[in-house]
């Protein structure tokens, strides 16, 4: 969950590295560092604990020479606290080799002992320094940076992306990856490496994803990719679909504010090109094949965090439309419990980053056990789609704020599209029914835009009154339940307030004991229009908690007068079909989490202890 940048080109390394790190800071932000090789072949490193700005300020006060070769790192600590010494790059014995790392080297203790026995001195508590010392020693023997790294990765266990450079090799950066991301950026007289394309999108839109267990050597005029045994590997270039401005704040106070405002586009862009004459056709599912999909007897959705809540919504829609039983599981729980899956199981992974290690491991497990594996992912060239049979990309654009918002609605959109595709293939819905659901889906962007217009100011005010609140409960039934869970997660991670989401029907089985006078409870109320609506039951739940002194904030369909007598505040949302209400109900909760965190003076883009891309298990 660190961010990595590498560059060879003209003498602007520092600008490239610091610009890239700024865009990658969402991946980790407890320390940062760079190593740059200047024109005289001297390597300078600088690393500082704290956010990237601390490093930038330090480089302004005490500049280092710029150069044509460099590597940069922004860290999320695993081994060793966030200190200057533990920040990357780490150096070889003679200080001539610099190395940065994302991931965890699981066998670092034994390698460290071996190095200590041979007289090495360690300056940090990291697992990374082991790799730096080992590659440095190999280089002293081989004088070949690529070969040195190849020899070392053969000895490493765990997950890693490593980048190295050496004083004696100006114009060369070598990278290796296993279970951690690394992407190449192809420039004109310059080349780049990055944890994701955001690292270099300012300079080039041409990219190449590096596969599992591969090594890449970049020079100004060449890029060579081999496997860990040194065999050449064919690579495929792709064009980055968004430009650099997409990962800028663009005048918003935070990335999160910008990304919430982009929720309508995230849905609209994910629908683009996938609906023809009102019917959903996902070409991306061809590698699995409609005949195979017709024979699937079970679907398992795997994901973590917010993506798992998107999965819970996917379950309601996919089951209803395709009549295939669907389970939703947290990736890490699925992977380590010997689940029953076979070639008639469709496993759908959901991941914004496409790099979440828990989900990646679950995907690999599903592949090994003959399931068909489909990924829903927002990041081109990421690892999880490459490890799957097929991928449906969400087109939410780059999501930089650590807390996921626009990716969530895009994930739900993609899952609904998959549900409608399956319904067509399996003939469980008529064309007219599919068209009616597609029309609902296509109406979602405008309705979200209406929620943003109508509720932003009111929720901002509400949040400002609530800065001293210690605990907030969220209730929802049916599709309102994942929305409640999502609202609670946002509040925890952004505002550091205790928050829990409950299925409203579960309340009387225990949680109602938490209700005391003044307890804030946010309730997602279903529409009263639907004949099968759970509306009366939710209104009864509201009455139960009100009777015990709860302060109720209801998210309810506009015009629903029945909640007014029982709610302290009502946030209205537009009318929508039952399965489409979550798209609208979740938006006020995203705004609420952000506004409450801002009102408490917290950094909404980079909440404490978190990182955007969780690439360790
Ligand atoms: C919460 C949040 C996380 C992610 C989770 C999965 O706001 O962002 O819970 O949803 O870490 O991440 P991806 O989707 O990248 O696999």
Image (tube, helix red, strand yellow):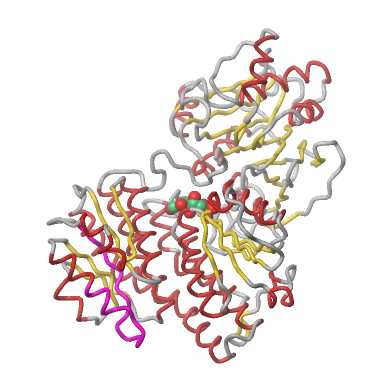
Q: Residue 545's spot in the image, x, y percent?
A: 18, 65
Residues 173 and 126: in front is 126
Question: How many labels were placed on the picture?
Answer: 0
Instruction: Answer left or right for 296 relative to 442.
Output: right
Residue at x 21%, y 70% (from the top left corner): 542
- Magenta-span inclusion, residue 526: yes
Tell which residue pokes out farthest to the right in this image. 231
Residues 308 and 460: in front is 308
544 w.r.t. 468: above or below: below
Instruction: Please state the extent of the stretch shown in magenta in the rendering.
Output: 520-540
Tell which residue pokes out farthest to the top in this image. 119
Question: Could you say which quadrant of the image residue 150 lies in?
Answer: top right
Question: Could you say which quadrant of the image residue 518 lies in?
Answer: bottom left
Q: Residue 8's spot in the image, x, y percent?
A: 71, 35
Q: Does residue 75 appear in this view?
A: yes
Q: Residue 424's spot in the image, x, y percent?
A: 63, 83
Instruction: Answer left or right for 252 relative to 98.
Output: left
Question: Could you say which quadrant of the image residue 318 lies in?
Answer: bottom right
Q: Does residue 248 appear in this view?
A: no
535 w.r.t. 386: above or below: below
Residues 338 and 91: in front is 338
- Magenta-span inclusion, residue 24: no
Quadrant in which the N terminus appears: top right
Residues 507 and 59: in front is 507
Residue at x 53%, y 44% (from the top left corner): 614
Instruction: Answer left or right for 464 relative to 163.
Output: left
208 w.r.t. 47: above or below: below
């Amino acid at each position: 969950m660190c961010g990595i940048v590498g560059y060879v080109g003209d003498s602007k390394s520092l600008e490239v590295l610091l610009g890239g790190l700024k865009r990658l800071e969402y991946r980790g932000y407890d320390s940062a560092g760079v190593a740059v090789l200047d024109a005289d072949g001297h390597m300078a490193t600088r690393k500082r604990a704290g956010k990237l700005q601390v490093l930038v300020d330090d480089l302004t006060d005490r500049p280092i020479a710029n150069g044509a070769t460099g590597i940069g790192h922004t860290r999320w600590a695993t081994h060793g606290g966030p200190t200057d010494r533990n920040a990357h790059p780490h150096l070889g014995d003679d200080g001539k080799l610099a190395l940065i790392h994302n991931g965890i080297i699981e066998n670092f203790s034994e390698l460290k002992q071996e190095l200590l026995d041979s007289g090495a001195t360690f300056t940090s508590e990291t697992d990374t320094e082991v790799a730096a010392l080992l590659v440095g020693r190999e280089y002293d023997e081989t004088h070949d940076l690529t070969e040195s790294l190849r020899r070392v990765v053969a000895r490493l266990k765990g997950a890693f992306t490593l980048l190295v450079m050496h004083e004696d090799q100006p114009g060369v950066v070598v990278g290796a990856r296993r279970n951690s991301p690394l992407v190449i950026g192809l420039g004109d007289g310059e080349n780049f490496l990055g944890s994701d394309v955001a690292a270099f999108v300012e300079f080039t839109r041409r990219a190449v994803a590096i596969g599992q267990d591969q090594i890449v050597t970049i020079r100004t005029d060449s890029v060579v990719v081999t496997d860990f045994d040194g065999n050449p590997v064919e690579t495929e270039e792709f064009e980055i679909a968004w430009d650099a401005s997409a990962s800028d704040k663009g005048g918003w106070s935070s990335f999160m504010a910008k990304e919430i405002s982009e929720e309508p586009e995230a849905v609209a862009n994910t629908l683009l090109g996938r609906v023809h004459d009102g019917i959903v056709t996902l070409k991306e599912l061809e590698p699995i094949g409609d005949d195979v999909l017709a024979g699937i007897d079970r679907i398992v959705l795997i994901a973590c965090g917010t993506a798992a809540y998107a999965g819970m919504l996917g379950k309601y829609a996919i089951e209803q439309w395709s009549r295939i039983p669907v389970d939703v599981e947290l990736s890490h729980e699925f992977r380590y419990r010997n689940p029953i899956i076979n070639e008639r199981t469709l496993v759908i992974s959901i991941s914004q980053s496409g790099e979440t290690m828990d989900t990646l491991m679950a995907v690999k497990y599903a592949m090994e056990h003959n399931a068909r594996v489909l990924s829903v992912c927002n990041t081109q060239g990421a690892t999880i789609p490459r490890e799957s049979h097929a991928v449906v990309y969400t087109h939410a654009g780059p999501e930089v704020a650590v807390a996921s918002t626009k990716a969530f609605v895009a994930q739900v959109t993609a899952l609904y599209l998959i549900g409608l595709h399956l319904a067509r293939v399996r003939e469980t819905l008529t064309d007219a029914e599919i068209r009616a659901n597609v029309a609902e889906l296509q109406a979602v962007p405008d309705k979200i835009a209406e929620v943003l217009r109508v509720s932003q100011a009111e929720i901002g005010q509400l949040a400002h009154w609530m800065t001293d609140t210690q605990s907030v409960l969220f209730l929802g039934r049916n599709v309102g339940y994942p929305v409640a869970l999502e609202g609670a997660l946002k509040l925890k991670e952004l505002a550091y307030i205790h928050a829990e989401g409950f299925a409203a029907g579960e309340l009387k089985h225990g949680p109602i004991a938490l209700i005391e006078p003044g307890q804030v409870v946010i309730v997602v109320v279903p529409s009263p229009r639907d004949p099968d609506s759970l509306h009366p039951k939710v209104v009864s739940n509201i009455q139960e908690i009100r009777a015990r002194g709860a302060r109720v904030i209801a998210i309810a369909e506009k015009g629903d007068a029945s909640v007014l007598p029982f709610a302290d505040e009502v946030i209205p949302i537009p009318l929508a079909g039952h399965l489409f209400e979550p798209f609208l109900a979740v938006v006020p909760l995203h705004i609420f989490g952000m506004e409450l965190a801002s009102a408490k003076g917290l950094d909404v883009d980079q909440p404490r202890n978190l990182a955007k891309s969780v690439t360790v298990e």
